[in-house]
Image (cartoon, rainbow, N blue to C red):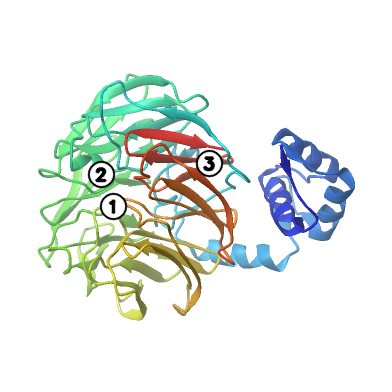
Amino acid sequence: MVRYGGRGDAQLAERIRAIHAMSRQTSGALRIHAELAAEGVRVGRERVARLTRAANFKATGPRCLRFQTRAIATNAIHRANEWDLPMSNSSRSVFFGANAARTGHFEGTGPLVVKRARWKFKPSTLATTRNTPAIHDGVLFANFDNDKLYALDLAKGKELWSVRVGGRVPESLSNPMVAHGLLFVVGGGQCHAVDLGTHAIRWSISCDSEATSSPIVVDDDVYVGTRLGGVVAIDARTGVERWRVLLRCGESVQAAVSVTRDQVVVGTRRDFVEGHVVALDRATGGERWSAKAGAMANGGAPAIAGSTVYALSGLGMCLRALDLASGKERWSYETGDALWGTPAVADGVVCFTGYHGILHALDQDTGKEIWSVALDKPPKDTVSPAIAGGVVYMGAGNVVHAWTLREGTERWRWKAPYRVSTAPLVADGTVYVGCDRAVVALG
């Protein structure tokens, strides 16, 4: 049972706004109180009514709600500036980076408090996971380094089926995604499309040996990088190659691909220091610009919000903000130590971490630090933060944390059975995360 003390009005009001936002009609205080009770939140009706009145909700249609608060207005402005693209048949899908632009900004909210895992899944044979799972229609898909991808019941974590995709180290770093009734994943040097109805591989197309890039599906196209320095665009339904390019910088694409309405943006690496951010024309694969930005780790991706690309630079030891149209640097923030993963961007704040064991939150437009927090242990290089409902979620060492986005105040922490090895997914009030030999659901 969750209790709110007298000083918990701000946290409770945030949850009330989230419940109202997810409703398809105007939510009164009685309905919101019932929703809170169903979640195990113990709070008086009068208090809920007072906070509901203070939020001053106004309905503008059965599926169009707006809040007359400055915080929500700010959120709407930044959401409108994100390149959140519609993806055919994937409106109920949740995947690494949250959207095509890989902002890590998930819809809805995560758990208010976590005391124990809802469920934990471990393969019957010893294996580890270093990729972020994907969710679609009540099923969670997790890729392990035992050459298998598992489909799990989202409610209980029980195995439904599995398929061999050639995903051994390092290919098990590739994050899966679902669209068009297909599960897309890289393994064995190929990009596979697995039919969700038959559980069989419908088509496969060669990337190259030891490919680690994560595929992204936008409209009818799949985009994926190759370890030998290329990017491939594929027809998602048929597996027919649309275009394939080798980047002029000649560097490996081991990170995930990010996509806007007309550009494909990738991070590259020659070693642990040298690398570029490259923007390609989405229709032709032609290079639009290339910017020196340091090596991007294989667990990362460029994050695109508004007209800015945010890229971490490995041993370049800084976060760079680049103009999406030209690749010119707008600002940079140096840490003095290696950085990895993918930045998360929401509500004017960009969050990132690295080997130095600090989570930073910067102003999205200026690069000025808003807050930072020292972690007990540095996160693995496949770990990134995620944001949902004004909260930042991330694992470091064998602990999963939740902090408020604006202040960096810790909401809760949960001790994992193993070291956290993936970025979190946030869906329907639950955080899903990989912990070396297991996938766990928190909420």
Under circle 3, the secondary element is strand
**Badge 2 amino acid:** Leu
Q: Earlier in the sequence, mark 3 or mark 1?
A: 1
Q: Position of residue 384 (x, y in %)?
A: 38, 54
Per the rendering, the mark at residue 438 is none
Under circle 2, the secondary element is helix
Q: Which residue is mark 2?
A: 173
Question: Closest to the observer: 44 or 244?
Answer: 44
Q: Which residue is mark 1?
A: 299
Local crowd size for mark 3, using a 10 Å CA cut-off: few (<14), some (14–19), many (≥20) = many
Q: Which residue is mark 3?
A: 427
* Mark 3–mark 1 distance (CA, rounded to whole Å): 21 Å
Task: Locate residue 258 relative to residue 268 in the image: left or right.
Answer: right
Residue that lies at the very extreme toward the front in this rendered image:
376
Disc tally is: 3
Does 220 appear above or below 410? Answer: above
CB atoms of marks 1 and 2 within 8 Å: yes
Q: Position of residue 152 (x, y in %)?
A: 41, 25
Residue 222 at least partly seen: yes
Q: Earlier in the sequence, mark 3 or mark 2?
A: 2
Image-quadrant location for residue 290: bottom left
Local crowd size for mark 1, using a 10 Å CA cut-off: few (<14), some (14–19), many (≥20) = many
* Mark 1–mark 2 distance (CA, rounded to whole Å): 7 Å
Q: Position of residue 146 (x, y in %)?
A: 22, 29
Image-quadrant location for residue 103: bottom left
Name the front one of labels 3 and 1: 1
